[in-house]
Amino acid sequence: MKPYFEKMSPFGSTLPAGKIKSGEPNVQRIKTAEADVDEAVAKVKNAGLPEKVINQRGQLTVWQRIAYLVDPGTWSPLNTLYNPNDNVEGTNNVCHGLAKISGKWAVVIGFDNKVIAGAWLPGQAEEVFRATNLSKRLNIPLVWLVNCSGVKLPEQEKFYGDRRGSGTTFFRHAELEQAGIPILAGIYGTNPAGGGYQGISPTILFAHKDANIAVGGGGILSGMSPKGFFDLEGAEQLIAAAKQFKAEPPGSVKIHHDATGFFRYVFDTEQGVLDGIKDYMKDMPAYHSKFFRVAPPAEPRFPAEDIYYLVPFNQKQMYNFDEVLARLVDGSEHMEYRPGYGPEVYTGLVKVDGFLLGVIANRQGFLGEDYPEYAPYPGIGGKLYRQGLIKMNEFVVHCGRDRVPVVWFQDTSGIDVGDIAEKAELLGLGQSLIYSIQQTDVPMMLVVLRKGTAAAHYIMGGPTANRHNAFTLGTATTEIYVMHGETAAAASYSRRLVKEKESGKPLEPVIEEMNRLVKSYNDNSRPVYCAQHGLVDEVARMTAIRDYLKAFAGAAYQNPRSICPQHQMMLPRIIKG
Amino acid sequence: MRRRAPVKAGAPARLRPIAMRPPTPRNGPLPAIVLRSAAIPAGRLPLLRAALLASLLTLALAAALPERLRAEAAPPRITLFPASVETGDALVVEIDGRPLQRAAQEYTVSFAEQRLALFAHPVKGRGVHVGLAAVPLSAPPGTASLTVAWVDGGRPQSRRIPFHITAGAYGEERLRVDPRHVQPSPPDLERIRREQEKLKRVYASGSPSRLWSEGFQLPVPGEVSGPFGTRRVFNGELRSQHSGLDFRSQTGEPVHASGAGVVKLAEELFYSGNAVIVDHGAGVFSSYSHLSRIQVGVGQRVERGQRVGLIGATGRATGPHLHWGVKVNSVNVNPLSFIRATAALSP
Ligand SMILES: [Zn+2]
């Protein structure tokens, strides 16, 4: 299949000098928005005790552990800002991401030991599910850095119980193991109760010499008061018991290495634990990259920095998506699927780090008087019409057959509406796309380049595709909402405007409410909000999008559950005709 | 640690009015905000519906327009943005007196101890004035107000414009340190005192008129490593709140002026190391600290993006980084909020 893949059609063009000059304000606006995200990330990373204090105790912080564990340049963080309950700690207390360890991709997740010694906090279980889902979707190992003091007791009601509470994690671990996905766990510090299960539920346990895991900690053992309340005598007993358990918490290395053998290995140093994991990662199941690569990896022919000039911060301005894509893919080459059909959508095959990926994206701009062919009005990019929906359905189905992972890029204002559009079957075709995605069973990734809006956000590989969407990336220009704030205000208040007008009442109060709604849509759709609430899994710099594409491609092709031989693929032949 | 309430759609704190106007008689002039909301982009709606709605709004507006504008009695329209402010944010006040063309000097705008320097709106033209205010980190969350005063037909007029301040979500750095390491030596203390006095003079010497024209930008491309407002607690005692933003970078990387202005200080200071302070006029200063080298001189005019020095770790810095500060009316504000607030004023 060399003739198809090694040299695809080159596309994209050098940024015109005029655009570089006139685009400078746009660059600055995007970079300022990225600095906003940076600042929020720095707050999460600085949460809890300073690094200095942790290091003085002879420990490394979770960030230092991750930095030591992963191959340089491969850490692709996810859900760093995820904190839907706005915890006072400033974090949900776990951090995770994709990274290579000893040359192999894994999902890495760790407790932030700077914050209440790595306690369970509200919102944390959901991030853990995202990490376990990612492992499952990509069929790659999960690596835990356990350091978990258990439930933050004053807030236990928010996450202890329930179907998706913190304990659900242990069933998810069992589910991964059942599916043949290994979970390696480095264990540090005191891990009682929930922390004990965090420690015991993985597949292989690498413990630090001072680590312990237990059904219950010293606090629980000494805290059972037979009277149902506490008095002075009870308090004295508590003090005595606490002193004893503080000296020797249950479930130490003496018990769980020497007696039970639950800890497979024990290391004297913090780094030793990580070295142990690194060593094990060498033997984790993985194909060599040459097995799946269709060409040697190559950089794009145009700099990623150009994207700051290409994507307008002002959502009302248009741009050429193909030029953006040319900055993201190997050699700025592609094989476009049905270029003349459904012009509002790009579909095509590209290479990232030598691996074949399918790309589906919204295109922007005026589509001409004759499109969509079923309507008297002209089409505008960003919207979806009949042909675009049919094309996406076809392309997704072919990617499923050929086992090609799919990357979606959204910048959509929704699907065409009105009776003409209904007659053109757009509702049915939208749900058909959902069915098409569901039956592919290939990993997918989404980049919300600008707008993720209306049902289009769902059907274009959105995070709603729970079993397929591995993760969703936002950018500084991302906005996610059911409809634009101004549209929402017009839809919600137009009748009231008419009514007030007819009854001779002043319109200003209604108009003020409309503007408030616009403002609230604006505030609650911004990148930092989207990331804090999990609408996107991370906000990446424009220049980092390709790194995430590489992580996705490398991880998706590391150990896929099914294979289509390259010489039996149909998509390249269909494109060639 | 004080934290902002969870942000929910519809949370009242986030829904404060964007613009506050004195009540207008039904046939009085329409506030600017009405006209703005009529500009619904047709591209976002199915065309037919958009056209319908737009014409509906236009009709409604046309009918409400007065037969003649009683301009002489019209109070100015006053708008604050952003609409929701956090402690440490910069705030833009826009005073639209049109069709009257009152001069900037005819208005007095004050917020707490700040007296705002007004300048002509760079885009909207004559009769529209703009001023910048700063919400201090120490401002109590809740309702605050800004006062605009002017004289109409010899009669003093004033309006209080209420707005809502929410507490910013700032982290905390708790450190236990040997008190001897926190306390500078007597000669150092004397130096610090002298420098503080000098800084006070510098910040009081700003040009009343606006010296920038093209808005502001980040001084370095680096990654933000130290958020604005972080509380530094030494031995259980709140010592300071981070007055600017820290950018992680390499020694020797260039540092650029974030906006046009005049250099007011370029020298080594005890805490800030090699520092440059630029006066942007109208109450705005920016500062660049811990530089390894200063590349501008006092009195020099700098343009936006012009190099002022190189990244370093001079003064009280643990490693090479840029501390970037912005002061509005002598109050430290989050530089990012300042860039955002002034972005709308750029031509
Ligand atoms: Zn600083």
Image (spheres, grey):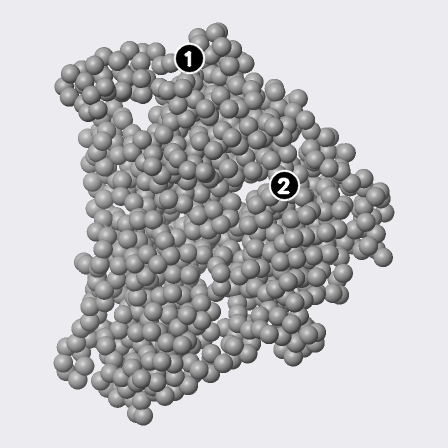
Tell me the number on the disc at residue A252: 1
Using the image, determine if residue B277 lies above or below residue B158. Answer: above
Give, as a three-letter code, the residue at label 1: Ser
Residue B26, quarter of the rendered image = bottom left
In percent of the image, x 36 and y 71: which residue is there? B121
In percent of the image, x 51 and y 45: which residue is there? A538
Q: Decide which of tag 1 and tag 2 comes sooner along the chain.
A: 1
Front of the two marks 1 and 2: 1
User: Chain under label 1?
Assistant: A
Task: Inspect this view and state whether residue B50 appears.
Answer: yes
The quadrant of the image that shows the N terminus of chain A is: top right
Q: Nearer the viewer, residue A564 or A300?
A: A564
In percent of the image, x 46 and y 25: which residue is there? A198
User: Do the residues indicated by labels 1 and 2 lie within the same chain of the protein?
Assistant: yes
Task: Inspect this view and state whether residue A71 appears.
Answer: no
In percent of the image, x 75 and y 65: which residue is there? A340
Q: Nearer the viewer, residue A500 or A551?
A: A500
Q: Is residue A220 left or right of residue A238?
A: right
Q: Residue furthest bottom?
A: B67
> Cα distance, mark 1 to mark 2?
38 Å
Q: Residues within 10 Å of mark 2 (few under 14, many from 20)?
A: many
Give, as a three-letter code, the residue at label 2: Phe
Tell me the number on the disc at residue A424: none
Q: Which residue is mark 2?
A: A552
Q: Residues within 10 Å of mark 1 (few under 14, many from 20)?
A: many
Q: Nearer the viewer, residue B337 or B1?
A: B1
Q: Helix or strand or loop: what does disc 1 sit on? A: loop
